[in-house]
Amino acid sequence: MLKQLSSLSFFCLLSIVSFAQPVSSAVVLARKQVPIVCYHQIRDWRPKDSKVDKDYIIPVAAFKAHMKMLADSGYHTILPDQLYSYLTKGTALPSKPIMLTFDDTDLDQWEIARPEMKKYGFKGVFFIMTVSLGRPHYMSKAQVKQLSDEGNVIESHTWDHHRVDKYKHDPNPKKDDWVIQIDKPTKTLEDITGKKMDYFAYPFGVWKRPVLSELRKHGFKMAFQLADKRDETDPLMTVRRILDSGYWTTKTFSNSIKHSF
């Protein structure tokens, strides 16, 4: 009996280890990176927008031109499950794969990005900041649900965009940053979509090594940053993206996709 329990305990431990480290970092790092693009606001620039703001705000005509370029160039959008399977198992991807991601729940992602992507049969990944749901200029729960129902992917992006590397645990769940910023928003999105949240995007793209294992403990199997170098010990939790800058021409955007990854 003790022998059986010991074997069972070993099996359970092995399962936990396998879940925590599904594949070696070397295997993931050896795979060719897939271009992943990040968008925030899609609107025309305003006089009060700063130079830094304009990196995160792509004018409407530019966004439409960039989507047309992707379609004309033969790119195929993929979703996180496909990327995860490719990185961990080597599962084949469509020719010229690309992932389109959208952060922060802005309404223009619904009003502009959604119909433009549908025109070309593209699907996107929407990282939702739940504090903004239903507020003016942001998407509603019903719109988020419809995006999910239409085959796009909804994933977690914290409650109100606080940096993950600043989180602290607290015995009181009402004061625990990991509960407030991660667990509760994730549950909200799962209730809205009826689907499990497996993926995460770092606010401001900021991460530090200690948070990687902590995010795994909270149920995520892959996380997305911006353009920093991937962590060599856990590349799945530091997947790179690039911003489609408001300053970029269509040619610059095309070259950045080809050469940034």
Image (spheres, grey):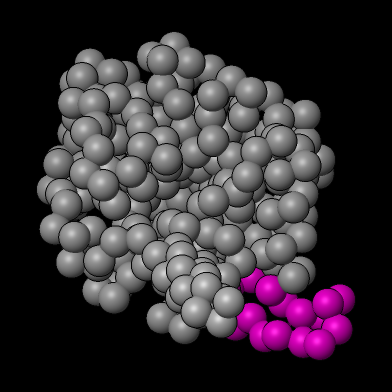
Q: Is residue 165 above or below residue 72?
A: below
Among the 4 quarters of the image, the one containing residue 225: bottom left
Q: Residue at x 25, y 66 (%)?
A: 24
Q: Which quadrant would residue 73 be assigned to in this image? A: top left
Residue 190 left/right relative to 249: right
- The residue stretch that appears in magenta: 162-178
Residue nearer the viewer, 84 or 59: 84
Labels in figure, total: 0
Left or right of 120 on screen, residue 175: right
Q: Residue furthest front?
A: 1
The foreground one among 64 and 196 is 196
Q: Is residue 167 magenta?
A: yes
| Figure quadrant of the N terminus | bottom right
**Which residue, as the protein is rendered here, is positioned at the far top?**
119
**Residue at image point 68% right, 24% down:** 146
Residue 92 coordinates in the image, percent (x, y): 22, 33
Residue 150 drawn above or below residue 183 = above
Relative height, residue 225 to residue 195 (above, below): below
Q: Residue at x 56, y 82 (%)?
A: 2
On screen, residue 172 versus residue 244, left or right, reads right
Q: Is residue 133 left or right of residue 168?
A: right
Query: Residue 197 in the image: x percent, y percent?
Result: 60, 48
Residue at 62 percent across and 29 percent down: it is 148
Percent position of residue 34, x then y: 24, 44
Q: Looking at the image, is 234 positioned above or below residue 101?
A: below
Q: Nearer the viewer, residue 153 or 35?
A: 153
Q: Taken as a whole, is the magenta stretch helix, strand or loop?
A: loop
- Residue 18: x and y in percent read 40, 65
- Residue 129 shows in this picture: yes
- Asked if residue 16 can be seen in this view, the reply is no
**Magenta highlight on residue 241:** no
